[in-house]
Amino acid sequence: MTRMIVTAGGGGVGKTTTSAALAMALARQGHRTLALTVDPARRLADALGVEIGAGIRPARTARGGVAFDLAMPAPDAALDDLAQALFTDPREREAFMGNGLYATLADAPAGMHEILVLLGLGGVLEEGRYDAVVLDTAPSRHALDFLAFPGQLAELLSGASVGFFASFAQRAGDAATAAVERSRLLGWGKARLEEAILKVLPPEFLVEGARFFADLGPIREPLVARARRADALLREARFLLVSAPTRAARQDALRLAEALPKPAAGLLLNRADDGLPPALAAEIDRVPQPAAEAAALLREEAQGRRDALERTERALRARLPTVPLHRLPTQHGGEPLAIVEGLAPHLEGLARTLMAA
Amino acid sequence: MDGFSEGLPPVVFVTGKGGVGKTTVAEGLAAARAVRGMAPTLIEVGEPGDVLRSRPLPGVRRELLTGEEALAKAAEELFGSALVSRLVMNSFAVRRLAQAAAAVRAFAVLDQIRIRARGGRPMIVDLPATGHGLGWLRAPGQLAELAIAGRAHEMARRVERELLVPARSAVVVVTLPEPLVLAETRELTSRLREEAPLGAHAVVVNGVPRPLPVPPGLPPGSAIAAEAARRRVRRDARRQELARLAGELPHGALLELPRWPLEPSPETVAAALAGGPSVAEAVAG
């Protein structure tokens, strides 16, 4: 069974980079690993030699040898990709994708993208190609809402709601005769529910909405099957929180911790030091006379970062006393690939724990 | 440049990616208005169970608006009665759909803001990080187009007409001083201008590193001199990107906030927003 590892954290904490570093650590321990990024980062994609929206690609690593796979699906193409994968009949696919509701959904509202990505990759996950999948979620306090989505989607598509909309579709008939449909629909709208809806929404909208569900017909079963598989994988997933020494990052991590379906397997704290590269730290301690002012300023900045770190650690420890805390040092240099390579060795112990039963 | 916040319409939407300091800027804007005795409301958009992330501020009312609550209120008005609205919204099919459609919730929240802002009440809205604000501002228009007529259509158009016009509201985009992040911001401001009812009124670049004062004569290989040089190079790259960004904001302002060693108070941010020279001037000069 593939081990799913879900990373969650607020914006700007280095979540995507940390996830890639974890994937690298897992790969170095011999696990076939896929890193899946829901919030694509162009710079990191470039550095690792993959293209956003181009499917699964091997990530480039400086040391060569053991590598991991990486996919950064483009948010605005996720629904198209899914429709391409599931519809076998091009005419049915076009009818589905031509619907006005489809265009609205394809804008990938928050939370939808994750699940579309999971569903789209359903095939890959099923083949057992990977021992580990690191899923990097959107940088939001509500990134974990998607955990419930596969189950909800399966319910929506297999349950009574489809019957409700499909019956609308059946009675609505052809959209081209919408004007005629109006009177027909109104005449048929005996139930209070239908009446109430028709009072506020034009019948054309309902015809379109109903047709959308009708057009889903051919792919409903495979879609539901994929949703259930994704649901099963997520139930067995391990969760990691990623944070950084800022108030917002701390608040986001604590909010996400509450939303987790089970305790987090680890709490990763990025930039967990004073942020001074060693050479600079050594020099400001010697305080060369001509640069005393600059040294004082650098010391003040470093002290500020130490204070922020202490405050963050205290708050996180107080609220999440049982979650193992992993401090990750600031990576200097700024090149994304170097940062991933620099972080990976710090995540080896965690990688081992995650893959242990 | 004194009084950047004085030139703003009653409602200010603060948007930006996660981690850029959106809440810090929203607090600063609220504090600036409170100082002028405007008694602003600071609205945070969230989900049930969220706590307010802004700090308590004298003279500022803080409120958490959730999509769920807003949706229930919008449905009540839409269907004309709480009973019918509950009947429809609690029906399995409609509820599932409404939950899935982020645009519907965004619209409902904007409608609640429209109601609260009637009579020109000053308001700062801290938008969620996802979607960069673009999806939010486009939501009413999208819904109006989907529901081509009827009461839902009228409600959506009313939000556009009464809230999303320059006299009533403005968008302030918060960003970071990294060239790549600024390039993304430029993409956002250009999309806002083309696709949303409101363009960006101002861009606030948050966390600009202070220049290091380094006199000549440091030994070669000095780490401090190297750090100072690195900051200069990054400042020059940033200035270039800011000059391009200024081109996207013909009537708007570009402001820089420094990187404070410790988290600034809302009053400090307010003072910096009011008194700091605009980057547009710095870029030009």
Image (cartoon, coloured by chain):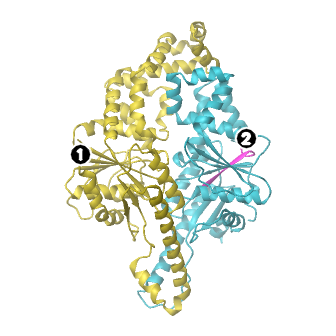
Query: On residue A130, which mark appears?
Result: 1
State left or right for residue A31 relative to residue B284.
Answer: left
> In the image, residue B166 lies at what x, y percent?
72, 46
Kindly identify the residue that appears in the image at 45 percent across and 38 percent down.
A112
Residue underneath mark 2: B116
A59 relative to B142, above or below: below
| Tally of marks | 2
Q: Write down the region rendered in magenta.
A: B165-173
Quarter location, residue A317: bottom left
Residue A52 in view here: yes
Q: Whole-percent x and y of residue A22?
A: 31, 57
* Residue A85 falls left or right of residue A289: left
Magenta stretch holds residue B172: yes
Q: Residues within 10 Å of mark 1 (few under 14, many from 20)?
A: some
The chain to which mark 2 is attached is: B
Of all chains, the one bearing label 1 is: A
Q: Residue at x 35, y 52 (%)?
A: A265
